[in-house]
Image: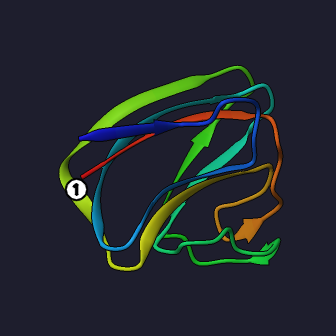
């Protein structure tokens, strides 16, 4: 498992380019919104999106989990934080993200 984290408040974190298994994450934000996982190597543009998975958080909430069954990503893995969601992206640079992949 390789944890990859942001170094400052951010709207996204590229975990890996290329095939991988998403194992979990630790993430928080100062505002309510959605953490979204995309099977991609770049952050999607704001607007309509189709994430591989999404998790809702309240303001100042931290989530910390690991999947018993990893999510397969064929292209890459990027986590994005959005104040809207789960099918509309409005990126917000208010998040701390640690992604776990192998």
**Above or below — where is 16 with respect to 42?**
above
**Above or below — where is 3 with respect to 76?**
above
Position of 102 compared to 38: left or right?
A: left
Q: Which residue is mark 1?
A: 70
* Secondary element at image label 1: strand
Position of 45 compared to 36: left or right?
A: right
Position of 5 compared to 99: left or right?
A: right
**Above or below — where is 14 with respect to 93?**
below
Q: Nearer the viewer, residue 56 or 30?
A: 30
Asked which quadrant contains residue 36, the reply is bottom right
**Above or below — where is 24 with respect to 37?**
above
Position of 2 compared to 63: left or right?
A: left
Q: Position of residue 85 (x, y in %)?
A: 70, 60
Q: Position of residue 89 (x, y in %)?
A: 76, 65
Asked which quadrant contains residue 93, the reply is top right
Colouring chosen for the image of the structure: rainbow
Quadrant of the image containing the N terminus: top left
């Amino acid at each position: 498992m390789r944890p990859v984290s942001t170094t400052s408040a951010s709207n996204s974190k590229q975990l890996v380019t290329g095939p991988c298994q998403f194992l979990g994450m630790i993430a928080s934000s100062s505002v309510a919104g959605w953490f979204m996982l995309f099977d991609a190597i770049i952050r999607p543009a704001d607007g309509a999106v189709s994430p591989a998975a999404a998790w809702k958080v309240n303001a100042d909430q931290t989530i910390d989990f690991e999947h018993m069954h990893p999510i397969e990503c064929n292209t890459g893995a990027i986590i994005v934080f959005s104040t809207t969601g789960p099918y509309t992206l409005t990126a917000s640079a208010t998040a701390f993200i640690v992604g776990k992949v192998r």
